[in-house]
Image (tube, grey):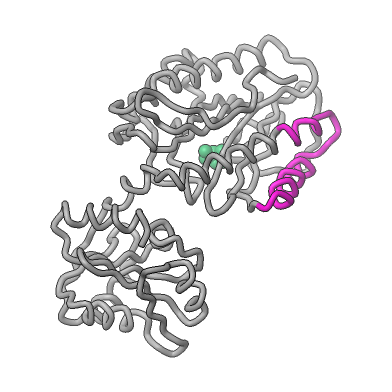
Amino acid sequence: MTQNIERLRDAMTEKGLPALLVSQIDNVQWATGFTGSNGFLLITPTDERFITDGRYTLQAEKQLAGVRVESYNSGVDGNKFIAQNAIDMGVSQIGFESDATTYSSYEKLKSSFNGVQLTPVEGLITPLRAVKTPEELDKIRRACKLADACFEHVKRMVQPGISEYDIGLEIEFYFRRNGAQLAFAPIVVSGERSASPHGRASEKKLEKGDFLTLDLGANLDDYCSDITRTVVVGEASDRHREIYGACLRSQLAALDAMKPGVLAKDIDRISREAMGDYAQYFTHGLGHGLGRVVHDAGRMNSTSDTVLEPNQVWTVEPGIYIPGFGGVRIEDDVIVTANGIDNLTGATKDLLI
Ligand code: GLY
Ligand code: MN
Ligand code: MN
């Protein structure tokens, strides 16, 4: 039994939910530690079962010690199999994840769960996922260390003439050589291209006077990191320094304001205020939760009523993107602590030239 199953059970009890079918695979993996691609968790106040297909029987039995695993073979209707297991568990009413179920999946569930009342459930798991367990924090810390090391490694390659592709490839090699996967395709954008927050690496070669933004993250042991630094290729002009300075001011103000009890939207506002006139070029939210997936539960933007709590992990990533010139983003990964934050990102924020 995992700690996250217990936390989910407590949340169900609080809401008076007699049973829940967890079907969204990231949520299933979060609750159980299963790493395969097909799995479902049936959970009641006193019991739970894990359902998967024959490809994953042995793996699930190994990864879910103490949880009963039932698997179906090819040719068996998965929905009917899940429903039958729920009925065997004595379930007559069950919640399903309405925010992660397509209309056609719902129709199939409905016809399989004949005689069982299906109740839509939304937003039950997200706030739980946002607050990490000590084991999860440990894994995220390790993924962050690897991202820092990768940045140290690739920044040495930065010089006029080298292509964005080459840098992107080196980031990937570095992570893979160190036993990790990419948390996402690295963003390597230079010159005018750096004004695109999520541009991909291209064959463009670095030139003197370019801003170069590197956004990279590892997925190590199923947990992610996500950091960004912008450097200048060759000499930095006053304009480079001014834009970089505004972005850094914004990030430091946000980091400084983060502590339990504060609303995510207030941190977002503080970051924009600290940017001054450049805030008009800050076109995305300030950050997001980080965990099993790079955009994990939680958003830090102008409308987010999420309250900061200890052991949430956030990215803090203001950016300034000036069309026709270029852009800057500075992204750190932080844990909310009892009275502030623990910044997991060590890469320097001095403007590297
Ligand atoms: N690397 C994607 C992001 O920063 O959200
Ligand atoms: Mn990023
Ligand atoms: Mn990010």
Q: Can residue 2 be seen in this view?
A: yes
Residue at position x 39%, y 37% from top? 311
- Say which quarter of the image contains residue 8: bottom left
Foreground pick, 20 / 245: 20
Instruction: Answer above or below: position of 58 versus 167.
Output: below
Q: Can residue 323 be seen in this view?
A: no
- Say which quarter of the image contains residue 210: top right
Q: Quadrant of the C terminus?
A: top right
The answer to whether residue 294 is left or right of residue 12 is right
Q: In which quarter of the image is the N terminus?
A: bottom left
- Ligand 1 rendered quadrant: top right
Prevailing SS of the magenta stretch = helix
Total marks in image: 0
- Say which quarter of the image contains residue 340: top left
Residue at position x 24%, y 81% from top? 111
The stretch drawn in magenta includes residue 90: no
Residue found at the far right of this picture: 161
Which x, y percent locates residue 243? Answer: 60, 16
Residue at position x 77%, y 24% from top? 233
Foreground pick, 212 / 257: 257
Which x, y percent locates residue 220? Answer: 59, 50
**Residue interval drawn in magenta:** 152-179
Instruction: Answer above or below: position of 83 versus 97.
Output: below
The answer to whether residue 340 is left or right of residue 46 is right
Which x, y percent locates residue 336? Answer: 40, 31
Residue at position x 51%, y 17% from top? 278
